[in-house]
Amino acid sequence: MYYEYFTVGTILFILGVLGIVLNRSNLIIMLMCIELMLLAISFLFLINSVVIDNLIGQVFTIIILTVAAAETSIGLAILVAYYRIRGTIAVKSLNLLRG
């Protein structure tokens, strides 16, 4: 019964990985794919928590959602600041950040 949910979560995670691997030029799409992977993992934690009747998966999901929100807000703030300075957010031009 829960196998359908496991396959949906796995497919979402694989789509996130493929989005990062196949798209190396647009940084915003890469951030969206990271978010998709984090949400797929949290979905799998929730399903696993229901299957084994344990609350640890739900606690991990809350932690993952908190980290995902912080990562998104900080990442987008850095991108906006970088765009204001350089005028582009292309991944090829981000090599200037290496120092």
Image (cartoon, rainbow, N blue to C red):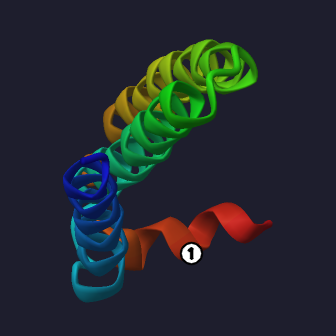
Classify the position of the C terminus by image quarter: bottom right
Place residue 21 in its image quadrant. bottom left
Tell me: 37 left or right of 61. Answer: left
Q: Where residue 71 sits: x, y (%)?
A: 56, 29
Up-down: is 71 above or below 94?
Answer: above
Residue 64 visible here: yes
Q: Where residue 42 sits: x, y (%)?
A: 49, 35
Q: What residue is shown with label 1?
A: 95
Question: What secondary structure is marked by label 1?
Answer: helix
Up-down: is 9 above or below 99?
Answer: above
Tell me: 64 left or right of 31. Answer: right
- Residue drawn at (40%, 28%), measured in percent from left and top? 76
- Taking depth in this image into account, of 13 and 17 the one nearest to the observer is 13
Residue 86 visible here: no
Tell me: 44 left or right of 40. Answer: right
Place residue 11 in its image quadrant. bottom left
- Residue drawn at (34%, 31%), measured in percent from left and top? 84
Type of amino acid at the residue the image marks with label 1: Asn
Q: Where residue 10 sits: x, y (%)?
A: 34, 64
Q: Where residue 56 sits: x, y (%)?
A: 75, 21
